[in-house]
Each structure stands twice: as structure tokens, then as C-alpha cells.
Image (spheres, rainbow, N blue to C red):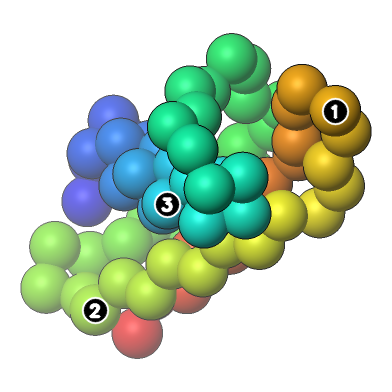
Amino acid sequence: VRAGALLKLIDIVAGVSARRHASCNCVTISVDAVVLLAPIPVSALVHLSASVNRAWSSSMEVGVRVISE
């Protein structure tokens, strides 16, 4: 899986989590860090999970974990 395609999926999953938390549309302003531990084969199943780590009055921090099988 290419890194760009993976980043797009991460952004989508983070956006869904943020929208559910805020009950309104949200946009990605920045990405703090992406750590790639190993390549993901094209035929691998990829599981993405997101959670809101912290929320303030007008912003939030969302963490995304990617696991491939």
C-alpha cells in the first residue's frame, strides 16, 4: 500500500471520529507525526481505528492506529 493512499485513509477515519465527537463538520489542520513501522503488502487486510484523545473549545486531537494482517 502506498503511503499517500494510507494517509488518505487515516484522514478519512480521523475525520469520521472528529465529526462524531463534535456533531458537526471538521477539517484536518495538521498532522503531528506518522510512524511507519513496516511496509503493508498490497494483499493485506488493513484495520484503522481512531479516537479523540483531547478536545478543547475549537480544536481536538485525534489518534489513529493502523494494523495490517
Q: Which residue is mark 2?
A: 45
Query: Local crowd at mark 3 within 10 Å, few (<14), some, or many (≥20)?
Result: some
Quadrant of the rendered image containing residue 68: bottom left
Which of discs 3 and 1 lies nearer the camera? The answer is 1
The amino acid type, in three-letter code, at marker 1 is: Ser
Element type at mark 1 = loop
Q: CA gap, disc 3 to disc 2?
A: 20 Å
Tell me if label 3 and label 2 are in contact, CB under 8 Å.
Answer: no
Left or right: 50 as drawn, with respect to 48: right
In the image, taking residue 59 as reference, residue 30 lies left or right, namely left
In the rendered image, is residue 64 in sight? no
In the rendered image, which residue does mark 3 sit on?
A: 16
Q: Residue at x 35, y 44 (%)?
A: 12
- As drawn, the label of residue 57 is 1
Q: Position of residue 6 (x, y in %)?
A: 32, 45
User: Is disc 2 surrounded by few (<14), some (14 to 19) or many (20+) residues within 10 Å?
Assistant: few
Q: Position of residue 59 (x, y in %)?
A: 75, 26
Task: Check disc 3 and report its element: helix, strand or loop.
Answer: helix
Per the model, the C-alpha gap separating discs 2 and 1 is: 36 Å
